[in-house]
Amino acid sequence: MAVVAPHFPLAGSPLQKKRLPAEQPREWYESHNRRLKALRLATALLDTGVFHPTQAHNRRIRAIAPLIGVRPPSDITCRMVRSLMLH
């Protein structure tokens, strides 16, 4: 059986950006961006065949990050990725 490389349609192509609402506290923007990053990473992991949070170690999550064009995530973001994979 041949191994097929995962296809990441968003890798290298910029996402369409929308303006965020003004006058929010800085923590809101940080949290919002962290959630978006975690969602992108969780989706990429699912595309590569990682379907359970126990398979998504920090090292594996950080290895996927450059493939989808994001910086390596923090421990908090890695935890959030695993949390998203439970739902």
Image: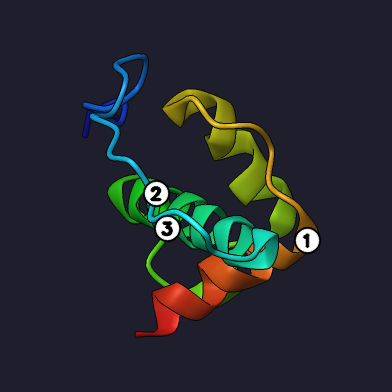
Q: Is the Cβ of the residue at disc 3 closer than 8 Å to that at disc 2?
A: yes
Task: Report helix, strand or loop for mark 1.
Answer: helix
Name the N-terminal-most of marks 2 and 1.
Answer: 2
Q: Is residue 15 left or right of residue 77?
A: left
Q: Is residue 31 above or below residue 11?
A: below
Q: Indicate the amino acid at tag 2.
A: Arg
Residue 40, which numbered label?
A: 2
**Hey, which residue is sitting farthest front in the picture?**
23
- Pinpoint residue 30: horizontal percent, then vertical percent: 63, 57
CA gap, disc 2 and disc 1:
16 Å
- Pinpoint residue 59: horizontal percent, then vertical percent: 73, 48
Q: Is the Cβ of the residue at disc 3 closer than 8 Å to that at disc 1?
A: no
Q: Is residue 80 above or below residue 71?
A: below
Quadrant location of the C terminus? bottom left
Which of 63 and 69 lies nearest the eye of the viewer?
69
Q: Residue at x 33, y 53 (%)?
A: 43
Q: Residue at x 38, y 49 (%)?
A: 20
Name the N-terminal-most of marks 3 and 1.
Answer: 3
Q: Indicate the amino acid at tag 3.
A: Ala
**Hey, which residue is sitting farthest top in the picture?**
12
Residue at image mark 1:
75
Q: Is residue 59 above or below residue 66?
A: below
Residue 42, which numbered label?
A: 3
Q: Is residue 43 above or below residue 82?
A: above
Among the 4 quarters of the image, the one containing residue 52: bottom left
Residue 6, which numbered label?
A: none
Q: Residue at x 27, y 27 (%)?
A: 10
Q: Residues within 10 Å of mark 3 (few under 14, many from 20)?
A: many
Task: Report helix, strand or loop for mark 2.
Answer: helix
- Pinpoint residue 39: horizontal percent, then vertical percent: 40, 58
Q: Residues within 10 Å of mark 1 (few under 14, many from 20)?
A: few
